[in-house]
Amino acid sequence: MMNKDLDTPIWQLTVREFIELHQNLMQRDRLDKPEAITISTSDEKYVYGIDGIAKLFSCSRATASKIKSSGKIDKAVKQYGRKIIVDVPMAIDLFGKHK
C-alpha cells in the first residue's frame, strides 16, 4: 500500500491493499483514543427524563429507555406519572455494578 498514490480511487485497490489501509486506520484511531471510557457527570446531582438518562450515559433515547426499563438503575429513579428524576451518583454506581 505504501507505493500507491493517495489519489487512487478505492475501487482500484486490491482486497489486500484495502485491508491494510483499514487496519492502519483502525490502529491509528486506537492510539488517538483513551482506553477507558469516562462518563462526564459535571456537578449535577439529578438528571430529568429519558433525555437526562441518555445524556448521562452518552447513549440514544431508545437505549436510555431500555436501561431504565431493565431495572438496573431502579433504586436511583423516582417516577411520578410522566416525570422522571434520576440520582446521578447512585445511577452510575448501580449501572457499574450490573455491567
Image (spheres, rainbow, N blue to C red):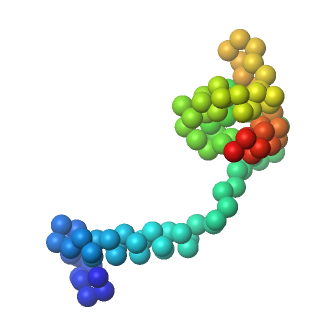
Q: The N terminus lies in which quarter of the figure?
A: bottom left
Q: Examine the rendered structure and indicate whether residue 44 appears above or below residue 9.
A: above
Q: Which residue is drawn at 70% across and 55% down?
A: 38
Q: Is residue 93 visible to the viewer in this orientation of the structure?
A: yes
In the image, residue 94 lies at what x, y percent? 78, 39
Displayed quadrant of residue 55: top right
In the image, residue 41 lies at what x, y percent? 75, 46
Displayed quadrant of residue 8: bottom left
Displayed quadrant of residue 56: top right
In the image, residue 58 lies at what x, y percent? 62, 44
In front of the other: 12 or 72:
72
Query: Horizontal placement of 42 versus 28: left or right?
Result: right
Q: Residue at x 61, y 33 (%)?
A: 64
In the image, residue 51 lies at what x, y percent? 62, 31
Q: Examine the rendered structure and indicate whether residue 60 appears above or below residue 75.
A: below
In front of the other: 86 or 98:
98
Q: The C terminus lies in which quarter of the figure?
A: top right
Query: Horizontal placement of 39 versus 78: left or right?
Result: left
Q: Is residue 50 visible to the viewer in this orientation of the structure?
A: no
